[in-house]
Structure formats: C-alpha cells, structure tokens
C-alpha cells in the first residue's frame, strides 16, 4: 500500500497563556512507495512519533492529508485504516496469554470481516510461526524475554493483515546484541510479508541498516529524505550531516579563500566556484588519510586499535564548537602504520567525505567542478 | 556540639575497655528476655482481642440457667445447639439475612457499575472541567455523612419512597450508590495502567466499553474485589439509615433488627439465645474474612477506610 | 489524542454518578444549611402552607442551650480524648512488637485484625453481656455478675455495676472506652504496621552501629519516620470518634444509657438522629453543622501541625 502524506501539520496549542503554540510536525509531504520499509529518524522532540501517530490515526493532523493508496484516510478512525502498530514498550495486555493477545485484534472485527474461531486461531498461529513464537502461545507476557515480547507485539500488529505496519522505536527496549538480531528479523518479516512499514527511531544506525529509505526530521520539519546511503553521502545541511554516522562527523571552522578551503592555516581542498566566506567544514571519520605530507595538521592524542580498523584521536584548534566531540576522530584501515609517539599527525582528505556548510544557514555548499 | 559529643566518646571507650565476650553474652541474654517479653505481651493482647468472640460462642451454647451461674463455666456443661435454632426464629433472622443480602448485593453491583464508569471517565477520557469536577468530588469527602442524612431522609419521605416494597428497598440502596472514595481509589488504579494499552486497543478497533471490560477491569480486579467486600460489609453493618427509613419488620436490615429483637425491657431476656443470634450475624463476616483476608487487609490499608 | 467525541462520552459515563451526587450529596449540603438557619423548622410544621420561617440563628442557640446536647457533646469529647490516644499508643506498641518478630507474626496479625470485620452492634452486645449484672438492683445479691466482675473478684477486687441500673457514669464510660479501643485497634495496627514495614532498614542498621538504645531508637527514629502514619491514624481516629454512635447502641441499646438513666451516654450523632426522628429538622441540621465545624477544625489543626511536625 502506497502511503502519501500531503502537507501534514500538527500544532499543539500551548497550555500557558501567551505562550507560543508548539508545532510538532510542520508541512510534512512525502510518499512511501508500496512495500517499502521507511525509517523516520530524528532526535527526541523532532515530531517523528507524532507523524507516526497521525499515520495510524491516534492523532488528528491540524491540517494536511494522508492517503493510503488513493483513499483519503485523514478523518478515518484508527480501526478503519487497517494499520498495525507496535509500541515502544510493546503494550501487551499483561493479564492475557500470548495467544489471547494475538487473537485480541481479530475478535474486534465486525460485520463482514468477522471470522469464525478456527480461522482466527489459524491466523494467530500462522503469524506466530512467522515471528517464531508459536511455542510460547500459552505464556503470559511477564514470562517472556524482551525480544520475545517484541515479537508478540509484532505478531499482534500483523495478525489482522494491516495495510501499513507502524513501529514506534521498536528496538529501544532491547539490549545491544538482541537489537542487531531483531532488526534483521524485522527486515526479514517486512520483506516476506511485503507490507509497507514505517518505523520511528532516534538511532541513526538502526535506521540506516534496515530502511529502504529514511526521513530525517528536526523540530517538526523534514530535513531530507532518500535512500540511507544517499543521505549519508550527500547531506543537505549540517544537521543531517551531524546526525548520521558513527562516530559522528568532525566539524571544523574553515574559510574559503581564493578558490581553496582553509582549516586554520592548512589548505585542505580546492574549491572552485565557491565565493570567499567563512564556512563549517564537515569531514567524515573515514575521510582522513594519514600521510606524512598531508594537508591537515593535527596534534596526535591517542590511537585506539579496534581490530578491524584503527581510530586516531587528535586535536586541532580549528575544531568547531558545533562538533559533537572535542577531539577529531578518524577511522583508518588497520594496516596503516602510525607512529604512536609522534606529536603530530597529518591527513589528506578524501574529497567525497568533506562537506562545506554555510556559516549562517548551515545549508550545504556544493563544491562545483 | 562538643558538649553533646562528650558522653558518646566515653561510652565508646568503655565499650572498648570491656571484655568483648562479656558484652556479647549479656547482650544475648537481654535479647532473649526481650523476645520473651514481646511474645508475652503480644499473646496477652491477642487473648484480649479474641476473648469476646470466645465468650460469645461459649455463652451461646449454654442453657439460660447455666449462663446465670455465679461462677461462670468456661466450657458449657450441656451444649444447647437449640439456642441457634431459637435465635433464628425469635430474631426473625431469616428475613433480616435475606433483606440484608438483597440490599447488599444489589447496591454493590450497581455501585460497582457507577464507580467503574466514573473512574474510567476520570482516568482515561478528556473533557472540559475534568479536574475541577474531580476536585469538587473529593471535597465532599470532608463532610460527615450525618449532614446528608437529614436532608436525604426528607427527600425520600417527600418522594414517597419510604412505603411499599420497591420503595423501601430503593431508599435503602440508592442514596449510597455513589462513593466518591471508591471512584477515587479506582481512578488511581486505572491511571497506573499504561496509556499505550489504550492506544493499542484503539488501533485494533476496540470500543471503550470492550477495552474497559477486557483490559482495565481484569487488571484492577484486586481493587474491585476489595471494594466489593467493603461495600458488602458496609451493608451488613449499616445501622442508622436502615433504622430511619425501614420501619416495618419486613424490610429491616440485620444490624437494627438484631439490636431491637433482643432488647426487651424485662429481665428475662434469654441471653444465650441472644448470643447465638449475635454469633449468627457475625458468622458471615467471619467467613468472608477467613477466605478473603488478603483483599480486605489490602483494601483497608491501601484505602485507609475507617470501619 | 483529545477526541471531541470523548466529551459527551465522558459525561455519559459520569451521568449516573453526577445525578445521584446532585440529589443525595449536593442538595443535602445546601438544604441542611438552609434548614439550620430557618427558625423552628420542622417537617410537620413545614407542611402547613401558611407557615413561613424566619432566617436566624435560633436553632443554634437552642441546640447549644439544650442540656441534652451539651451532655452529648461532653460524652463525645470525653470518649474521643480517652480512646484516641489510648488506642493509638497501644496500636503503635503492638505494631512495633509485631514488626520485630518472625514466627507467628502472620497469625497474630490476623488475630489483631479480627475486630475490624465485626458488626459493632453485635459485638457491642457481647461486651454488654460480659459486663452486665443480672438479677436485682442490689449488686451484692445479684444472680450473675458478668465475667469481668468474676475476674475482678478472682483477683480480690470488688464487683462494680458497669452498665446496669445504678451504675456510675465513670463505669459506663470505662466500658465504652474498652469497647471502642478494642474496636479501633485493627485499623490502626494495620496502618502503622504497613508504615513500619516500609521504613528503610538502613536507618536501624545505622542506629545499631552507633549503639543507640532500643528506647531511643523507638522515640528518635521509629516515631518520627512513622509520623505521617501516626498523624493519619490520629486524625481518622478523632473524626471517627466524633461520629461515634453504633458502639454505644451496641452496648447500651437505643436508650443510650443504663436503664435508670437513659440518654446518659448519648453522642452527637445520636442527638442528631433523635432530633430528626422527633421531627426537629432545624435542630438536627444545626447540630450536624456544629459537628461538621468540629471535624473541620480538627482537620485544619492536624494540617497545621503535620506540616510543621511531621518528618519527611
């Protein structure tokens, strides 16, 4: 099912007199293609959960439209939209067994959709097998591990064969190892069912790893949409660049002078067709190549061996206060030889890993050819 | 500060100087003595608590003659089970039991429905003036019930409810159906149920009533059971209002019926029979207590309802 | 998530409660105040259409001057002042003892809770039988003197007319105090024990390390930490005490006193009902407002004290 959001806006009136209304989601327009997995991504308070709740119908948009296929569902109650929702804390009914939990949505069907008992059970077991909990059907939620509860929640959302599956921070309540495993399973389930799926997360790694496309939001405004790799490689502004990637991007205060980019005294990149100005410079950790005669000079602090690769920690006076870390973190191949006792390290910068941003608007400045 | 510290310092030094073994052994003895004293005290108090119950049963099984012995017997010499039979007949207990049960059950059921609906509205629904209304309800709990009773008595008299079968029962039941306190108690319980469960049910197309019935009520069952028991006990023990409005014997409830049935002015009151009646009235409460102690004690300690 | 449909739905759910509350709670508050200030108001006389009532405080004046009322007020206050501190202290000691033991603790807790699940009229009659003297006004020649007197004589004391004809006022009060304390213990023990069990054990460990004596621990740690519960038990005790009625009915019957002096032990609530039954709604209302005033004052005093003294 194709999901289309058109100028979706949600305003929460301020409770205090004279205060400004809170715009949770501002003019959100996006189309989710049929059968795709889309991640809504952003820091807390960015409006991603509100967007999700509007898609499922628990919250009404202040203005704008939502279409499932060609059907306008904006004013439809959640139960008539055919959506399945998995809550962050799963919201399993604690007094019911797994089976009763999964059956519960089916028992609500009325009229033509009403199912007989055997069909309901069959459907419940089918979906339980899909998420591999068919052995646990008679247990209560409290007797299950976090990962199992999560699967029950997914099964409960899937059992009525929703047109759209919605997941609210599906992995945040799981421990790190389980998270890796579960996110793959979610991807697998989504692919095997082919249900259009939207999920919300604040964890960019989670979003990038399984989404077909991601939507990055900030303070109610959509910043950028696209396939995860595209967004990562071509961030539209400083916020997106900073938000995606671990370790986070390193941000410097730089200046474009006479067709070249300077970080401090170091001339690091030729920038044709960019007019002279002060800029923010973002360099991905993997964009650094240590070289004896490298362009960017930094004082070496530490070398962390991670096995597969090596993380070089260094400092530079030009490092911006915008940077997430107070040090420069660069990731290089483990084979690279680095003198740990050296006081200084110099890098060449990969041109496709360095981004310039306008100092005021923080918009990306495209370096022309 | 320095002055206050001084005695403690000396105490510490004497402690160190003393032979530690000595200290340990005297402490042990002290502890044993203390434990014995505690048990003696608790046992004695338990006896005092239990004695009236024992005396009630003991007396209820005696003949009137044995009851009047100068030195009373602690176990009845001849056990007269007939006292219970007589009490049942003389006190018209059967009618009183049925009346009280009827009033108790009907008022409990209706009261639960009203309480659940109101608590749900206060806990889960959004509407204008919710907080103000809730505060107003809580404020009425301050006022002693006697203040209401006066006008309520006039109201039901004017409505002409005090006569006839349905009328009298209605009067016994309706004025006390709403307990602000139970609404408050249940609302608190409902609020503890995570909101996500409600939203999940909404997404699944569950109606409010079905959600209430299938999720909220099962999850707050302990509170509802506590309320049920306390409400039933309330009906069993209510005295003032039934005495006021149910003047004919056909509608008398157990408490007022009991006191009036055996308080003849003449000195020939058959005390053993009276005690048998008292025991019969106490028995259902006792049984409820034995089987549902957990809920009662929890309900009372959580709600702090004064009996 | 605010749904406009929820508005009328909420009111629908609340409707039964609101209707009943308006009729049996809100209206009575208004009407009782009105009647209290209508002079000489009574149901029978109010049926007389020509009769109009003047607004005034005559009802209050009458009530206060009424000797029966002052007796009731005195009885109620006396019972409160005696029973509340005694039962609270006793409950506190029992709770602390219960909290300090392991074996039999649950059994004893159950026993101590038993009086809560009783019918106060029924057990009042049992107490009456334990104290009652049968056979003759001359107690030295009485047929049966009641188990309590038997015990007193066993220990070499003299028999006392507790509740029968010729009994003294102080003996009557003593019986009522014993019964009310017996009846009030379970609730107080339950609340205080619950409070004790939720006190962090670390305080006691800390005190032990400092070598604090048990007595000091009780007064300096247990009581202050329990002070919210104690305050709660005291306030409910006083409020309950001022509404005392059924316990007296249980022991003395509806004449509210020994046979030769009915009404001697009547209470505030008893007075209100006597007036109501006697068709003096104005007086009953005035008395109930006085009762409300007393309860309000106690509550306010308690609030004031507890905001200062209660620890936490």
Image (cartoon, coloured by chain):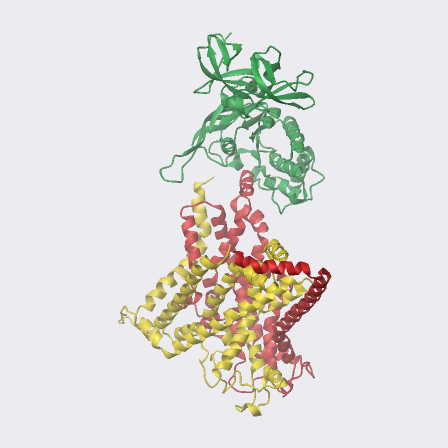
Chain colours: A green, B red, C yellow
Residue C15 is left or right of residue A156, and the answer is: left
As drawn, A259 above or below B264: above
The percent position of residue C114, horizontal first and vertical second, equals 61, 68
Count of all numbered marks drawn on residues in the image: 0
Looking at this view, is C44 or A167 the one in front?
A167
The image quadrant of residue A190 is top right
As drawn, B237 above or below A81: below
The percent position of residue B242, horizontal first and vertical second, equals 48, 70
Q: Residue at x 40, y 46 (%)?
A: B128
The image quadrant of residue C183 is bottom right
Residue C24 is left or right of residue C212, and the answer is: left
The percent position of residue A100, horizontal first and vertical second, equals 64, 43
As drawn, B54 above or below B102: below
Looking at this view, is C56 or A270 the one in front?
A270
Q: Is residue B177 visible?
A: yes
Q: Residue at x 56, y 72 (%)?
A: C182
Q: Is residue B178 visible?
A: no
Looking at this view, is C151 or B33 the one in front?
B33
The percent position of residue C60, horizontal first and vertical second, equals 33, 71
The image quadrant of residue A359 is top left
As drawn, A211 above or below A274: below
């Amino acid at each position: 099912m194709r999901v289309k959001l058109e100028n979706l806006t949600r305003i929460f009136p301020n409770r205090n007199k004279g205060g400004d209304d809170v715009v949770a989601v501002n003019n959100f327009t996006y189309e989710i293609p049929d059968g795709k997995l889309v991640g809504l991504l952003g820091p807390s308070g960015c409006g991603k959960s509100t967007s999700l709740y509007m898609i499922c119908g628990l919250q009404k948009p202040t203005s704008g439209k939502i279409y499932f296929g060609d059907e306008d569902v904006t004013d439809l109650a959640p139960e008539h939209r055919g959506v399945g929702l998995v809550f962050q804390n799963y919201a399993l009914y604690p007094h019911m067994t797994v089976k009763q939990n999964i059956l519960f949505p089916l028992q609500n069907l009325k009229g033509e959709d009403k199912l007989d008992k055997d069909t309901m059970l069959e459907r419940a077991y089918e979906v339980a097998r899909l998420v591999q909990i068919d052995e646990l059907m008679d247990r209560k939620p409290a007797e299950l591990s976090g990962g199992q509860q999560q699967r029950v929640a997914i099964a409960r959302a899937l059992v009525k064969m929703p047109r759209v599956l919605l997941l609210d921070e599906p992995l945040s309540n799981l421990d790190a190892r389980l998270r890796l495993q579960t996110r793959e399973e979610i991807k697998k389930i989504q692919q095997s069912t082919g249900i259009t799926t939207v999920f919300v997360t604040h964890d960019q790694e989670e979003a990038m790893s399984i989404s077909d496309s991601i939507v990055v939001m900030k303070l109610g405004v959509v910043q950028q949409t696209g396939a995860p790799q595209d967004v990562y490689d071509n961030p539209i502004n400083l916020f997106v660049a900073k938000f995606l990637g671990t370790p986070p991007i390193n941000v410097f205060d730089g200046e474009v002078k006479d067709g070249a980019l300077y970080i401090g005294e170091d001339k690091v990149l030729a920038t044709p067709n960019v007019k002279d100005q002060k800029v923010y410079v973002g360099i991905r950790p993997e964009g650094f190549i240590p070289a004896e005669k490298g362009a960017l000079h930094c004082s070496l602090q530490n070398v962390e061996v991670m096995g597969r690769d090596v993380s070089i920690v260094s400092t530079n006076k030009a490092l911006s206060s915008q940077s997430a870390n107070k040090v420069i973190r660069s990731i290089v191949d483990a084979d690279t030889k680095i003198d740990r006792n050296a006081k200084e390290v110099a890098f060449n910068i990969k041109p496709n890993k360095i981004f310039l941003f306008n100092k005021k608007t923080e918009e990306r400045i495209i370096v022309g050819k | 500060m320095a002055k206050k510290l001084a005695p403690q310092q000396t105490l510490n030094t004497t402690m160190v100087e003393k032979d530690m073994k000595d200290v340990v052994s005297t402490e042990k003895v002290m502890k044993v003595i203390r434990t014995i004293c505690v048990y003696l005290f608790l046992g004695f108090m338990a006896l005092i608590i239990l004695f009236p119950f024992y005396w009630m049963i003991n007396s209820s099984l005696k003949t009137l003659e044995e009851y009047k012995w100068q030195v009373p017997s602690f176990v009845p010499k001849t056990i007269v089970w007939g006292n219970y039979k007589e009490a049942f007949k003389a006190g018209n207990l059967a009618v009183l039991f049925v009346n009280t049960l009827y009033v108790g059950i009907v008022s409990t059921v209706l009261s639960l429905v009203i309480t659940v609906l109101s608590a749900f509205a206060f806990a889960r629904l959004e509407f204008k003036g919710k907080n103000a209304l809730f505060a107003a309800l809580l404020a009425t709990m301050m006022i002693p019930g006697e203040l209401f009773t006066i006008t309520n008595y006039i109201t039901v008299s004017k409505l002409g409810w005090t006569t006839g079968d349905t009328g009298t029962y209605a009067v016994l039941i309706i004025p006390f159906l709403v307990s602000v306190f139970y609404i408050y108690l249940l609302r608190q319980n409902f609020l503890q149920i995570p909101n996500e469960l409600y939203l999940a049910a909404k997404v699944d197309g569950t109606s409010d009533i079905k959600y209430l019935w299938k999720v909220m009520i099962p999850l707050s069952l302990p509170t509802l059971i506590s309320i049920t028991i306390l409400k039933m006990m309330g009906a069993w023990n209510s005295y003032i209002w039934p005495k006021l409005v149910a003047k004919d014997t056909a509608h008398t409830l157990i408490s007022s019926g009991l006191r009036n049935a055996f308080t003849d002015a003449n000195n020939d009151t058959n005390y053993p029979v009276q005690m048998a009646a008292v025991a019969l009235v106490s028995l259902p409460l006792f049984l409820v207590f034995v089987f549902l102690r957990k809920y009662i004690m929890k309900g009372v300690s959580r709600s702090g309802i004064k009996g | 998530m605010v749904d406009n449909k929820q508005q009328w739905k909420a009111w629908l759910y609340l409707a039964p409660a609101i209707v009943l509350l308006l009729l049996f709670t809100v209206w009575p508050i208004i009407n009782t105040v009105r009647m209290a200030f209508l002079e000489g108001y009574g149901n029978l006389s109010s049926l007389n259409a020509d009769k109009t009532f003047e607004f005034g405080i005559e009802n209050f004046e009458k009530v206060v001057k009424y000797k029966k009322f002052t007796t009731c007020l005195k009885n109620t206050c006396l019972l409160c002042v005696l029973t509340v501190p005694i039962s609270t202290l006793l409950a506190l000691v029992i709770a602390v003892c219960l909290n300090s033991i392991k074996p039999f603790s649950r059994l004893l807790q159950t026993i101590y809770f038993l009086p809560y699940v009783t019918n106060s009229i029924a057990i009042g009659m049992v107490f009456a039988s334990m104290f009652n003297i049968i056979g003759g006004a001359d107690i030295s020649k009485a047929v049966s003197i009641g188990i309590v007197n038997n015990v007193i004589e066993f220990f070499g004391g003299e028999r006392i007319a507790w509740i029968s004809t010729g009994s003294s006022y102080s003996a009557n009060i003593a019986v009522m105090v014993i019964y009310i304390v017996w009846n009030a213990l379970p609730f107080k023990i339950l609340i205080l024990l619950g409070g004790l069990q939720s006190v962090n054990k670390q305080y006691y460990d800390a005190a032990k390390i400092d070598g604090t004596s048990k007595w000091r621990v009780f007064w300096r740690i247990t009581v202050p930490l329990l002070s919210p519960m104690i305050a709660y038990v005291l306030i409910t005790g006083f409020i309950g005490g001022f509404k005392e009625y059924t316990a007296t009915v249980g022991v003395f019957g509806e004449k509210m006193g020994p046979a030769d002096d009915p009404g001697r032990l009547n209470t505030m609530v008893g007075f209100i009902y006597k007036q109501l039954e006697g068709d003096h709604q104005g007086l009953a209302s005035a008395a109930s407002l006085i009762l409300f005033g007393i309860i309000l004052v106690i509550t306010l005093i308690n609030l004031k004290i507890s905001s200062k003294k209660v620890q936490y």
